[in-house]
Amino acid sequence: EEGARPFSIKWLCQRQDKSKKVFFISPTITSILHNPKNSRLKVVHCGLRAFEHSDSFPRGLPCKDRVVQDGTNTMYPFVTKQLVDVPLKWMVKLFATTQLKFDQINDEEFLESLKAVSPGGIMLTLKDPKKEVSMEKVVVSAWKGNTTIVVMCNQLERQAYMYAIGQAYPDLDDGELKITQPNPFPPGKKQGQGASSMEVESKEESTATAEKAEDGAVSGTSANKGVPGDA
């Protein structure tokens, strides 16, 4: 895709040969690690977790690796495929319920863009041309099954995005979901214990999780727990 940045495989590493997690290392750090003069250098930890692999996914997929939420903003400039622009209404629903079935989507343009990408790991980008939600591109890791799409970020991340959307669009109400301003200290919560970042009212089941995904591709909603066989 025109404008995409060139990418080098040398920027990726694994701690062990059979590790399911792949880390991204900046070019500067890569040159230091590969310099023969630094052979005595001991590295405790470096890199950003960017990809994760699992053999538990259905057979026949073109790729069993996916971009994890931690690495979405870093990897986005290099990605040319498996990208789907998501209208605000549908991104809100995904954050609220973690998944959508294709037959629930009545937006033809959005549905066609989903069908255009291959099953497996995908990256969702929020359609926010005026950058009301964030000055940076909102990019979310997700998984596309045969009949379902599931977001692969944890509850706190989803709440943070919902809060940002609620601040940018305080009157958003599509008839099914209504975003309200958050209560910093809801009943039962003491100051310093944290609070719910966003209240979501939904006419449909808001407790749906990726465990109920029809195709069984994913077994959880957390970026850390959402992939079968996570180490």
Image (cartoon, helix red, strand yellow):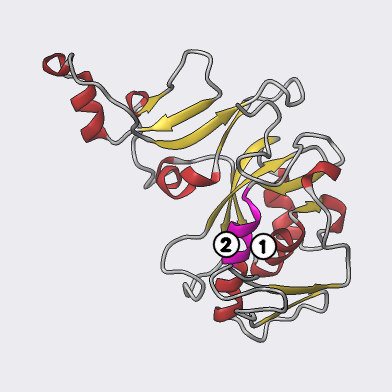
The kind of residue on which mark 2 rests is Leu
Disc 1 element: helix
Give the image location of residue 50, x and y in percent: 47, 37
Give the image location of residue 222, x and y in percent: 66, 46
Q: Nearer the viewer, residue 9 or 34?
A: 34
Q: Is residue 37 left or right of residue 219?
A: left
Q: Residue at x 34, y 31 (%)?
A: 45
Q: Mark 2 = which residue?
A: 126
Give the image location of residue 93, x and y in percent: 74, 64
Q: Mark 1 = which residue?
A: 91
Above or below residue 210? Residue 44 is above
Which class describes the residues within 10 Å of circle 2: few (<14), some (14-19), or many (20+)?
A: many
Magenta-highlighted residues: 153-161
Give the image location of residue 14, x and y in percent: 43, 22
Q: Residue at x 79, y 54 (%)?
A: 100
The answer to whether the residue labelled 2 contacts the one labelled 1, judged by CB atoms less than 8 Å apart, is: yes
Q: Nearer the viewer, residue 229 or 61?
A: 229
Q: How many discs mark residues in the rendered view?
A: 2
Above or below residue 229? Residue 136 is below
Disc 2 element: strand
The image quadrant that residue 160 belongs to is bottom right
In the image, is residue 154 part of the stretch drawn in magenta? yes
